[in-house]
Amino acid sequence: MGIFEARGDQFIYDHEPIQLISGAVHYFRIVPEYWRDRLLKLKACGFNTVETYVPWNFHEPKPGKFRFGGMADIERFLRIAAELGLHVIVRPSPYICAEWEFGGLPAWLLADSDMQLRCHHKPFLDRVDAYYDELLPRLAPFQCTKGGPIIAMQIENEYGSYGNDGRYLRYLKDAMIRRGVEVLLFTSDGPTDALLQGGSVPGVLATANFGSSPASSFAKLREYEAEGPLMCMEYWNGWFDHWGKPHHTRDAEDVAAVFGEMLAAGASVNFYMFHGGTNFGFCSGANAQLHDHYEPTATSYDYDAPLDETGQPTAKYGAVREAIARHAGVSFTPAVNEGLMPAPAERIAYGVLEMQEQGNLFGQLDALSEAVRSTVPLPMEKVGQSCGFIVYTTRISGPRPMEQLHVQEVRDRALVFVNEAFVGVIERAEKEQTVSFEVPAGGAELRIVVENMGRINYGPYLKDRKGITEGVRLGFQFLFDWSIHPLPLEDVSAIAYGGAAAKEQKQPFFCRAHLDVERPADTFIDMSGWTKGVVFVNGFNLGRYWNRGPQKTLYVPAPLLREGANEIIVFELHGSTERVIRFTDSPMLDGDVKSQ
């Protein structure tokens, strides 16, 4: 058993003062085979603590259907941390932000049109309670009071940036305690009056999140917490990337200097991130500070962190390690742990792979999903879908002259086809885009393929339903009577392939080939020449690619590959200049950013 507490202005563990040097490592962004490697590198850098969020939607993808295996096996992650002698901070809030799809909230909450999020709304709290009933008993045995590594847990995440419902925060606190949480509880918010007022809970340790100016940030925290250990719960030492924007970097020496200021002040620090990892599948979120300013997050969550997306040390790792070594009084030092550093993972450039087979999308919609008939074009959540794509089909009578198509509140990107001919794109982030067409005398089939590019994960517009959320008009006339095919692409085994892939393509399509591997190793798929889509390796969704940049490659961890033949599937929405993909041994995260 261990006792961790805030006493006076210090953290105390087993009756001894401790300064927490912590780093965020998200188990859900890393294949499990690499968890130990990342945590060993954390410890070898001189850190004594690891911090992780717990994404609700990752563990309860369907109401009442829980998953705690594979990448969702948080108990295995905690056991590894314990074996390595690391303390653990867990942040299991219903909401986590984290640039993660919907901030970790499950999309099925939005199937209820009256749902209110992150407040004392009984239907929301009922779902939180059901989730906590499953999650918290799994975490409770890992608390330090039970001999485990967990020393602290968060009540809610940056709540002051969203609301001021103190009753809601107290409910979450009591809900955790009722389910056996005994360790130190805390909140974390930005260092401003409004945020600390809205997000703090009386009697609960408040911490601050910032990336610079530690003296003024801690001074503001002291105005609201006159006594207690100072802690920066999120030291933003890097940043995340949006599609179509430059790759973010921050100077390593600047990061180390600000870190050193906090250590010298006696504060505890949690690096956000120490290792970012990857937004595999459809897990990346989006930002929208204004209602019509939508920015989806890239697949790579490299974050310009001390460990890069593949877990390799960067210049920032060395600078941070030296800062810890210079600081007196830190219980874990790099000198003690220098023998822990694992060998670098092997990387192999497997060369060029020709995509030999093709299957067009429209001819096999019924094989991929069961159609839903509806008078109006329902959003994803109303048909039981969270992520991926959704296809809407209706028939328009003719003849009609050239008229503009209006897709009201498309979320997020719609490809429009008339009689299977592509006529244009309507994109949420580009309000000026329009599509117009004529309808012949015999009428026409209208088909709209909508992609969920990631639900908003931060700010006032969290209630971000996907697909077509209001209606479709041709000119002034609303169109009714729709057939809807949900395409979450959770299983791509039903796709039928024909002959060789054609270079000219008029609709979304799947391409398949098999990569023969003698020795599985980390690698990267260079998607140059392709436009937009997703890639699957042996059925595992690597995530989105887009020629807008900045990300040009998709990371393939070695455990996703096997000796012999490996199935590679590309789902391309538009087309490519050639039907090949290239496997390289180097990532490209700072490619040219395109405006189209």
Image (cartoon, rainbow, N blue to C red):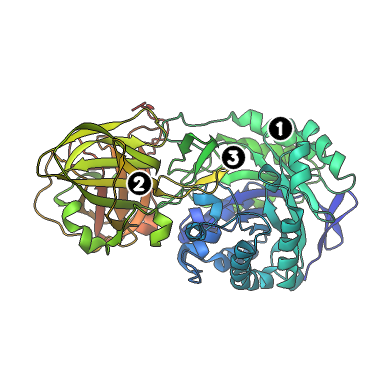
Could you classify mark 2 by the number of other residues whose Cα lies within 10 Å: few (under 14), some (14-19), or many (20 or more)?
A: many
Check the image and report above or below for 140 versus 585: below
* Residue 451 horizontal/vertical position (percent): 35, 46
Residue, x 74% and y 35% (percent of image)?
260
Lateral position of residue 241 relative to residue 137, left or right: left
Badge 3 or badge 1: first in the primary sequence? 1
Disc 3 to disc 1, C-alpha distance: 14 Å
* Residue 565 horizontal/vertical position (percent): 22, 59
Badge 1 or badge 2: first in the primary sequence? 1
Disc 3 to disc 2, C-alpha distance: 37 Å
Q: Are marks 1 and 2 in contact (CB under 8 Å)?
A: no
**Label 1 element class:** helix
Three-letter residue code for mark 2: Glu
Could you classify mark 3 by the number of other residues whose Cα lies within 10 Å: few (under 14), some (14-19), or many (20 or more)?
A: many
Residue ID for mark 2: 451
Residue ID for mark 1: 258
**Label 3 element class:** helix
**Label 2 element class:** strand
Q: Is residue 580 visible?
A: no
Compare residues 266 and 535 and report the one nearer the observer: 535
Compare residues 224 and 471 and report the one nearer the observer: 471
